[in-house]
Amino acid sequence: MNLAAAILVDGLIDASWLFIVAVGLTLVFGVLNILNFAHGSLFAIGAYAAASAVGWYYGGNIGPAFFGYFMMLGAALLVAVVIGPLLERGVLRLFYRRDEVVLVLVTYALFLILEDATKLIWGVDPYYAYEPYGLLGNVSVFGLSYVGYDFALVGLALVTGVLLWLGLNRTITGKVILAVIHDRDISAAMGVNVNRVFVLAFTFGVFLAALGGAFTAPKISVQPGISISVILLSFAVVVIGGLGSVEGAAIAALIVGLARSAAIHLMPSAELFIVYLVMALVLALRPEGLFQRTTARKI
Amino acid sequence: MNYRGFTIRLLAAAAVLGAWASGASAQDDKVFKLGFVAFLSGPAAESFGKPAWDSAKAVIEALNAGSVIKPYDKVGFGGMKIEVDLIDENRGATKQVEELRNAFERDHVDAVLGYIGSGDCLAVAPAAEELKKMLVLMDCGTPRIFEENKFKYVFRSAASGAMDNIAMARYLAKQGLKVTDIGAIDQDYAWGQDSWKDFKGALAQLEPDAKAKVELWPKFGAGQYGTEISTLLQEKPSLVYSSLWGGDLEAFVLQAAPRGLFKDRLAVLSASDHVLQAVGNRMPDGVIIGARGSNGQFAEPSPINDWLVAVLAKARPGVNPVQPHYRGAQGVLGLKTAVEKAMAANGGKKPTTEELAAAMVGLEWDAPAGHIKMALGDGHQAIQSNAAGRTKWDADAKMVKLVDIVRFPAECVNPPPGIKAADWIAEGFPGAKCN
């Protein structure tokens, strides 16, 4: 029982983190049809920005401790507002009519540029934002001690997922975005300002990547190289869920999180293998991923 | 055409070129061109590459200024100024081989010192040997380099990683710390696997009742260890062992300490001194720490150690010197000793690669971490003393101090010549000379 509970709780916590870091990638793919290699770098920039903001806030004893969480949120927003439109209007827009492979290469170039830009701004020394990690105390589940912050991440993932779903399905802007996801040419013909949707969606994708980084920062040492593992896992999640599907990302994150948790508890050496086994199985049975609808080819 | 004028101009140009060439040659003899390789970017830059370079740079600048204490007080290397070509170790072994070739063949460096990653060391060593060029490995841990190969031009100025884990096991035994079962968490690549194998083997010799209970293998750069920590908490081993390093180790400690993983059990972090300053009071008291040699807080007071600490305090104020600082300085001082030994033998001329390699074989020198001997691998692989201790947060000094330190002579934790580290451990350390 304890083992099952531990697998479940650890899987849920892991899945929440995976969902937060991967959902931005799937949203950007859904709207812009771009597999954004730079997603990991945006995650890293979010982590750096949050660590800087948190360090400044707690270093100066500026206000109540819990306000540090808002600093992290604010840092993610700032990253999105500054970088999102800049990348979309300044770079990606120029390549929309090119082959998809060219766009992948462009985002890979952006990944390399952003990695170096991050080093230029923050250097290679590590940054820490550990104060918010301990603010929520510990929680005991079936005799195992967990840090309350990890459960707050579960809450953050739920809120992010629900708001994103409501935003896409229950608002006019969301419906417009869904229309563009469905068919950008018809949407444009119907008078939708597709360019504006692109900027909005990409900026929101950047925000989600940065949010993942910002709320991961308190648990880690923020330093060069943190983007690599994130981009690999995010790809696995969105491929399993179906490129462009928010619901798919949620379910895939849950599957991957639980599979990883079960592997670590029961067969630790299979931890890495299990993620790609799940991916291979899903791709074998449903090549388009769990949640992506099969689309008719345009002629 | 005025052929006479043209010939005169040609001869004049040749004379100028000749003078320049001979000047350049004379200039070459006054300069020792050193390629220095370390991670300047990527995940290992902060923990190892940058500190190693900071330290090597400070030592080289002091050597060029002639301001190092005796016996290192001669300017540069034997009077030759040291010029450094700095090379980033990031982006994989294939690139490193290419960079090494460029350093020797295009940039004409006299020797290359560096490399932190074991994979990089294994890749560049045969390349240097093929080029017949002097390569001194400074940091990487794998014992395989000289256990599985014979080189003429390749050396390693620091001990291999096997010594770290033997020292950890010896510390537990010497302190009478009883271990019944072990939970291990190590990165899933050569360093993690070798470290765990060596520690498990060494402890089996010293505390035969200690059994491995759980082995966890997160990938390098994982960053998230929640599930691994739950597994360790659930298995309740009497000792948690880890060879994690850098950002991975910092994340592990930041996530494990609040969950009480280090409470009421022993914990061994075999190569962890370099994270103590970053983690600060989040590192629990009583954790057993290694520094891959008598480095940092484990270094015994000596003139050269005191000098290095003072120089680094100026070069990097507020940074506590740790293992990569020590290994960077150790490599530079070792190479200097070899160059000057070779010059003493050849009448004071700049040594050829052959002369330099011959001088380095079996070399001994005093480094900040103690006395270094090129004792293994036919005189190509260094051995050095090691130490272990336990963490204790000092609130006044606002730093983690290391207490209950136990020191181990080089011959106690390194195998004697002619036997592989793994075999030496398996045979129960025959010929070990401990205090």
Image: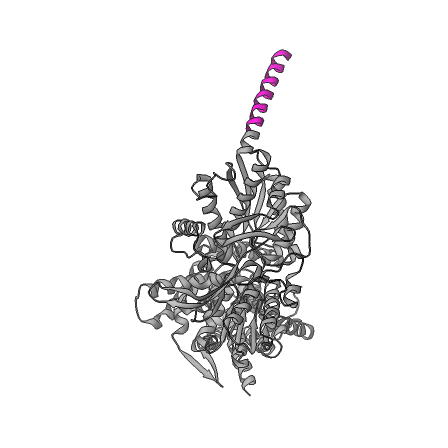
The answer to whether residue B91 is above or below residue A187 is above
Residue B391 shown left or right of residue B135 in the figure: left
Residue A56 shown left or right of residue A88 in the figure: left
Q: Position of residue A298 (x, y in %)?
A: 65, 65
The answer to whether residue B336 is above or below residue A268 is above
Numbered range of the magenta stretch: B1-23
Residue B395 shown left or right of residue B72 in the figure: left
- Residue at screen point 48% across, 69% down: B288
Which quadrant does the N terminus of chain A fall into? bottom right
Which quadrant does the C terminus of chain A fall into? bottom right
Q: Residue B210 or A127: which is nearer the viewer?
A: B210
The answer to whether residue B355 is above or below residue A188 is above
Q: Residue B308 or A166: which is nearer the viewer?
A: B308
Q: How many marks?
A: 0
Q: Quadrant of residue A26?
A: bottom right
Reply yes or no: does residue B400 show up in magenta: no
Q: Residue furthest left?
A: A62
Does residue A202 appear anywhere in the picture?
A: no
- Residue at screen point 57% across, 35% down: B350
Q: Position of residue A136 (x, y in %)?
A: 39, 77
Q: Position of residue B237 (x, y in %)?
A: 54, 78
Does residue B23 appear anywhere in the picture?
A: yes
